[in-house]
Image (tube, helix red, strand yellow):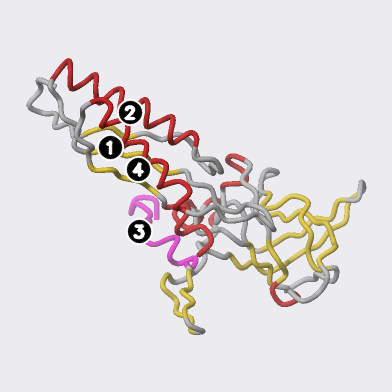
């Protein structure tokens, strides 16, 4: 606090991700206001900003209900106000981070079906033209998704499959044991929902796989807002030293 190189504004918390209950945020408020009070009494520091973070849950499985933002925000604001008043503190500016809640359902990833393979044990693998390069979340921490064969969306979805990508990795699995159209076949389009958070920003060129295009769809119109990468794009900026030519 005595350092001229440090300008402290307040406190920032992160209590988790994909939370379906507001209890964790309310408990975090208790800890944060307690710290505010301690810093004020010991150092005279007045908290200007209090960042409660995010982690507000979004649907992960077909049939999941969407929790309202109000369900999270109202208890946070009410509890911060009450606890600050009890401690005799001025309520600081409150910051929240509802990123996933805003963008997750806005993203849908389209894959083209390649190979379909039945293996002993009753498992059917569906290979697609993407994978952990455009969505590393299942491989990183077991994120779950659901989807539909877009060009057969009106057909019964009773066939259990595991959807895998094209990277040379045993962990390149996008969806495990999901139900898709019974007649799924090569060149079908598989739409995977809730990929807005944060697949595009987490994508990579692992295995020299180009990134996919991003298309904005609004009011029945579509516009490319990020071009599909080419193999030339992957080599852009690379070179061979003259003495090796």
Label 2: which residue? 32
Residue in the picture at 24% in, 19% down? 38
Between discs 2 and 3, the one toward the N terminus: 2
Helix, strand or loop at disc 4? helix
The residue located at (54%, 44%) in the rendering is 18
Crowd class of label 2 (few under 14; some 14 to 19; many from 20; radius 10 Å): many
Q: CA distance from mark 4 to mark 3?
A: 49 Å
| Helix, strand or loop under label 3 | loop
Q: Position of residue 126 (x, y in %)?
A: 77, 59
Mark earlier in primary sequence (1, 3):
1
Residue nearest the viewer, comparing 243 with 13: 13
> Is residue 23 covered in magenta?
no
Mark number displayed over residue 237? 3
- Disc 1 to disc 3, C-alpha distance: 43 Å
Foreground mark, 4 or 1, reads: 4
Name the residue tied to disc 1. Answer: 50
Q: Are marks 2 and 1 in contact (CB under 8 Å)?
A: yes
Q: Dividing the picture into quarters, in which one does residue 225 lie?
A: bottom left
Q: Which residue is the site of mark 4? A: 77
Q: Could you tell me residue 5's position as x and y percent?
A: 11, 28
């Amino acid at each position: 606090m005595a350092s001229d190189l440090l300008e402290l504004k307040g406190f920032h918390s992160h209590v988790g991700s994909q939370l379906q209950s507001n209890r964790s945020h309310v408990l975090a408020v208790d800890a944060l206001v307690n710290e505010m009070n301690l810093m004020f009494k010991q150092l005279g520091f007045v908290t200007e900003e209090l960042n409660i973070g995010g982690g507000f849950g979004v649907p992960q499985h077909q049939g999941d209900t969407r929790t309202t933002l109000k369900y999270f925000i109202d208890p946070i604001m009410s509890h911060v106000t009450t606890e600050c008043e009890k401690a005799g503190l001025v309520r600081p500016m409150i910051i929240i981070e509802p990123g996933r809640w805003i963008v997750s359902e806005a993203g849908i990833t389209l894959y083209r079906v390649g190979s379909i393979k039945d293996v002993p044990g009753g498992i059917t693998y569906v290979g697609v033209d993407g994978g952990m390069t455009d969505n590393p979340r299942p491989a990183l921490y077991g994120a779950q998704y659901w989807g539909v064969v877009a060009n057969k969306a009106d057909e019964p979805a009773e066939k259990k499959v595991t959807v895998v990508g094209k990277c040379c990795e045993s962990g390149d699995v996008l969806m495990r044991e999901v139900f898709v159209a019974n007649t799924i076949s090569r060149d079908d389009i598989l739409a995977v929902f809730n990929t807005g958070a944060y697949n595009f920003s987490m994508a990579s060129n692992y295995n020299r796989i180009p990134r996919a295009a991003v298309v904005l769809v609004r009011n029945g119109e579509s516009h490319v807002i990020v071009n599909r990468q080419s193999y030339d794009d992957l080599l852009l900026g690379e070179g061979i030293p003259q003495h090796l030519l």
